[in-house]
Amino acid sequence: GAFKGCSSLKQISIPSNIKLIMECTFEGCTSLFQIKIPSSITSIENYAFSECLSLEKIVIPASITSLGDYCFSKCSSLKQLVIPSSVLFIGKGAFCGCTSIEQITIPSSITSISDYLFSKCTSLKTIKMTLAVTSIGTGSFSECSSLTHITIPPSVTSIGGGAFQKCTSLTQIT
């Protein structure tokens, strides 16, 4: 990645002539707390912002259609996340280990919850899914220890192994 491991990098304003954020571009930029993603970006690739430990908020512009595997994994300070309905694909483990996220809304553009998507999001309390969701992948919400209830839409026809494994506070499934 172009800036991988730049541990002192604190802010990024990505120029508007950039179309996609390549694999591992900002991986391990542990001091990064602010990112401005322009509407010219259509894709955030695998591991692009993985292990950006100081990142608290991410605004994903409506131009984005694809979020790669583990693209925001282990962003342990990430609290605010809005996924726009322009996003058609979210790769496996995209938000795995984001231990500060408390709530998430899956947009109606997403039909499949990828494997390990929110695994180890230990502060996650609320998940909202639409009727568009038809499958929940392996380990998708595993180890979400703050999750107390989950409503699985009737549109879901398959749930992968360990999807809710070790959700130790889970008391209600509807």
Image (cartoon, rainbow, N blue to C red):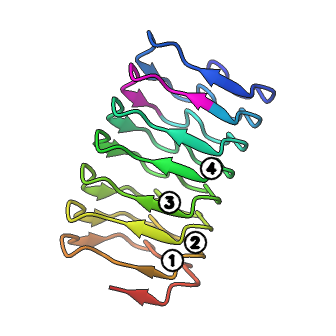
What residue sits right under mark 1 in the picture? 165
Residue at image x 52%, y 13%?
A: 15
Rounded to the nearest angstrom, the CA distance separating label 2 from label 1 is 6 Å
Q: Earlier in the sequence, mark 4 or mark 1?
A: 4
Whether the residues at callouts 2 and 3 have beta carbons within 8 Å, the answer is no
Instruction: Determine crowd level at label 1: few under 14, some 14-19, many 20+ residues with C-alpha closer than 10 A.
Output: some
Residue at image x 81%, y 27%?
A: 8
Instruction: Tell me the magenta residue range.
Output: 35-45
What residue sits right under mark 3 in the picture? 118
The front one of 165 and 49 is 49
**Total marks in image:** 4
Q: Secondary structure at mark 4?
A: loop
Whether the residues at callouts 3 and 1 have beta carbons within 8 Å, the answer is no
The front one of 13 and 22 is 13
Whether the residues at callouts 2 and 1 have beta carbons within 8 Å, the answer is yes
Within the magenta stretch, is there residue 40? yes
Q: Secondary structure at mark 3?
A: loop
Residue at image x 36%, y 63%?
A: 137
Mark in the foreground, 3 or 1:
3
What residue sits right under mark 4 in the picture? 78
Q: Position of residue 1 (x, y in %)?
A: 61, 23
Q: Which mark is residue 143?
A: 2
Rounded to the nearest angstrom, the CA distance separating label 4 from label 3 is 12 Å
